Amino acid sequence: MNNETTTLISLKEAMKRVGHKLQALEAQFKELDFTKDNLTQKFEHHSKILANQAAQDELWTAVLSFKFTPMELNILYSYVIEVLIRLHTRVLEKLPDLVRGLPTLASILRRKVKNKRIRVVWESVLEEHGMQEEDITALCTFFVAHGNKAEHYIAKVRQMYIKDVNFMITNMVKNQALQDGLLKAVQVIEKGKAVRAPEEQKSSLEELIPSAKS
């Protein structure tokens, strides 16, 4: 075997070793890319959790630091409870076979997480009323914080005390999520009164308020 042949064999072996090293490096880079992507996803998820927690903290702080008079608080509560009852009732209308299994709005919110049928109907009901999940979170937070001590006022009483509830909300509620939720609650109830008979509204309210407070 001459020197040229020996050199060629040595070169081929060296190229193989280089090729193996390149393959090993490629595998390591792929693993690093996967690790990086995984860490990025975890970081983004964690950031979302922290952002949601911060938003929830701000919402609770806003709800618990209200400077409303008892009368003003009752008026806001009246809009909140009526819109929550309206949403609950609308879901039951679309899911008549699940009426017994969905006695309260809380049961809908709880079961929609794992039940696609309930979730789809719930989302369609929100869309019908021009509302979003964030609005419901704000309204439910308000209800939990003040529902045990607030009193429901019918529409005539509300109008007698407050002429412009939208101005009151905009002027006094500084948390944007809570302000949006309360304003939408007022809009839904005020618009709904034009198409629903007073007797129907009164009957629905009397029947459903006990279950909503439980």
Image (tube, rainbow, N blue to C red):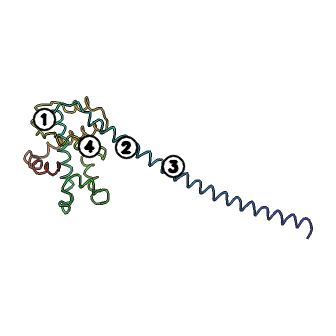
In which image quadrant can residue 100 be found? bottom left
The location of residue 174, given as percent across then percent down, is 30, 32
Nearest to N terminus: mark 1 or mark 2: 2
Density class for disc 1 (Cα within 10 Å; few <14, some 14-19, many ≥20) is: many
Secondary element at image label 1: helix
Density class for disc 2 (Cα within 10 Å; few <14, some 14-19, many ≥20) is: few
Residue at 18% x, 39% y is 77
The location of residue 214, given as percent across then percent down, is 17, 50
Compared across the picture, whether 165 is left or right of 17 comes to left
Instruction: Check disc 4 and give the amino acid type.
Output: Thr
Residue at 14% x, 48% y is 209
Residue designated by label 4: 141
Instruction: Check disc 3 and give the amino acid type.
Output: Thr
Instruction: Check disc 1 and give the amino acid type.
Output: Arg
Compared across the picture, whether 214 is left or right of 56 comes to left
The residue at the far right in this view is: 2
Nearest to N terminus: mark 1 or mark 3: 3
